[in-house]
Amino acid sequence: MSIEKENITVALASIPNTGKTTLFNQITGSHQSVGNWPGVSIEKKTGHFQLGERRITLVDLPGAYSINVTSIEERIVSEYLFNTPPDIIINILDARNLYRSLGLTLQLAESGIPIVVAVNMMDEARREGIVIDFDRLSEHLQMPVVPIVARTGEGLDNLKEEIKRTIKEPYKFRRPRVSWPSVMEDAIMLLARKIEKYDIPQKFDDIFIARRLLESQESEEQMFKSIPSIVNLKKETETLRTKTEKRLGEDMPTACAKCRFNSARGLVAEISLGSVKVSDETTERLDNFLMNKYFGVPIFFLVMFIVFQGIFRLGVPLQGIIGDGFGAVQNGLLGWGLLSFLPEFWKSFLIEGIFQGLGIVISFFPLIALFFVFMSIIEDTGYMARAAFLMDRLMHAIGLDGKAFINILLGYGCNVPAVMGTRIMTSQRNRIITMLLIPFTLCSARLQVFVFIAGILYSPTTAPLILFALYALSFVIVILVGLILKLFDFAGKTEPFIIEIPPYRKPMVKTVVLRVWMEAKDFLYRASTLIVVGVILVWLLTHLPTDVAVGSKDSWAGILGHKLLPIFQPLGIEWQEIVALLFGFVAKEIVLGSMAVIYGADPATQIAAVLTPLQGISFMVFTLLYSPCIPTIAAIKAETRSWKIMSLSIFLGLIIAWIVTFVVYRTGLFFGFR
Amino acid sequence: MDKFSIVPNAECIIESGKGENAIPSRLLQMGVLPGSKLRIVRVGPMGGTVEVVIDEAGSIALRSEELQLLRCKLTAIPLVNYKVMNSDKYRVRELRGGQLFLRKMKLRGIKEGSIITKITEKEGFMVAVKRKGEMRVGYGEAEKVILEPFKNVD
């Protein structure tokens, strides 16, 4: 019986770290779209590929060890499978550790949905001397099995061929051979007979549903939204479960997992040769050094230092060149004859509003690209897990894990890639909190402003101390805000921390390049609109009404500055600085340029004349902490897909900036500083 | 797992994967069944985070407080922490060191399989090795001598 549908959906399911996303990228190439799974801000990747005449939709499911729910990822996978079952599942196994991968396979195999098994990482398995009898495996599972190497693309044609064949003629469904205790079997059969009476979507086997009901600790309503009648069985399921568990002497999840994994163990013993080494010698030796109690942390900081230098030493000049290039083109355009037919206002809008916005988007490209080059290398080699292990304790205090540390640290270079980099984090809760903390780091753009102002207002001996104090303040605020967010239990409870420490691997140029390309493209698609809109908004504020000088007292920004003055006066911030801060939304370094516009003369002498040293500090503290710049805001929006979290980030910044600046300024006044 | 037995090279057999709290049920779904062997590889530089190797699950990092929720039976412990084991006699299960270390231990009559009848802590450890007599083992060395409980079957 072939699958007679026009649109066929194939889902990729596997346990974590089996190369699922690599395979997804390999199959779909650039035909991808990204959304969110319902109810959570976890990315849902969907792609397309051509199979003969057909266009197939491929869904990348999050990595899950099981469809019993013990994590958010597992909840997503099980809800997806039950409520919108795909036509075919590609289940990826890790050739080096078939046992662990097969637990999920045996669960999925009961469902009745046709499965194509792809055994990945064959290159590494071969190197380790593991031999697998694929025909035997296929015979046992009653599913097509294809060996592949997702990283290099080996075996992908065969995989597609098998999918094609499965569409035409799926394997006859047979339940996997697992020896269940008879007590459990009786209960399952009893329940299955009752389920039979309900109208169940064709794809599912009754026994599968029965076992899910008995085994799962999830509520039935949640799990089977598409089969509402199942709820009628709620009471019976519960009595049956209690009875069975009592007779088994252990709970259902334990009993079921035991049976499944024992079968998996038997299967592995039968179809493969070569033992799985838990850890190889090179890895062990490297770890003794890189994860050493004493050198581990210094080495980590050295690695981060190199990454930092790599990203920002190369990236910032490139950003500057692109920025200058755009600036030159911008000036060229302003004087360009062809545009002279436009009224001055529209010309300025086009060039200084829209064009500048685009320039900012583009100028972030080198930073993002370099950032992801280093990040993918760190991740692909396996060092990321080690770094997370080393720094975990430090972040645990504020309810985060080691990976958060890496991102926050990178925020000190530039917030935008740091926010995008939170993708390496598995826990969604931690990811959101990290994104909210990153904007409090003192990035290189803010540093430019501080160096400039401190240089004007303070003596050469005090200025470095002020800069140091600002760094320290930024660190303290990150920790404090982290503690506050933890206190409010914001973004859900802490999840148990389990990370796998994989053996070291050589990163592949191709996967790194592909990743960089995808991320850069993503940034362009997802963040650029918001950045351009933001820049235009600020432009409008400062350029309207048309008959006054830009950013002057009578411009909208100036009027707003005056209106906001009562809020800012307690902080020692004047209306001119408020306007500068408004400009600073676009990108924090613009604060400097805008001051030149606002003061209408050499900003250095003007600042020295207008600001007292204490007011200078006040202004810098506010600049450090207030709402992230528009590109960062756009990145947060793009990553979380949530207006709520984006707004929270803006307001959190404003409120904390106000409070801290108030405290600093008033304390300063109290001690007689001016 | 007892807080004091979370030290590098301690080994235990996981007894329950009962799914009341999150870590055991997670491990269960990863294929870590009751009866799996767990070895502590290292404790993080600031404490709190632990790397373990579990049969079939490979190398994973978790937190000490979560590891403590796992019920397991201690099967081996380095000599430094012998008190956690609470046994009358011990057998040397493993000497985790290089050639030089093995030779140094051999000179003192300590090799894999040696039976230790009494341990006292004094400027390092005084170890009574069966049929060899009292030997001194330094603190550093004691981290690499892995003991398991020994029951007489005379």
Image: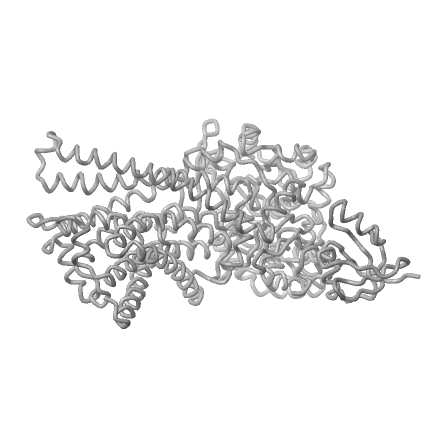
Up the image or down, A658 lies above or below A18; here it is below
Point out residue A31 in the picture as x, y percentages from the top left corner. 41, 34
Pick out the residue farthest to the bottom.
A670
Toward which corner of the image does residue A138 lie, by quadrant? top right
**Nearer to me, B8 or A436:** B8
Which quadrant is the N terminus of chain A positioned in?
top right
Up the image or down, A561 lies above or below A329; here it is below
Identify the residue at image location x=65%, y=49%. B57
Point out residue A57 in the picture as x, y percentages from the top left corner. 45, 37
**Nearer to me, A56 or B93:** B93
Point out residue B72 in the picture as x, y percentages from the top left corner. 70, 61
Report if residue A194 is visible in the image: no
**Nearer to me, B1 or B45:** B45
Identify the residue at image location x=88%, y=60%. B133
Identify the residue at image location x=17%, y=64%. A565
Identify the residue at image location x=29%, y=58%. A626
A576 on left or right of A586: left
Pick out the residue farthest to the left.
A547
Report if residue A298 is visible in the image: yes
A370 on left or right of A94: left
Point out residue A59 in the picture as x, y percentages from the top left corner. 47, 41
Which quadrant is the C terminus of chain A positioned in?
bottom left
Number of marks in the rendered image: 0
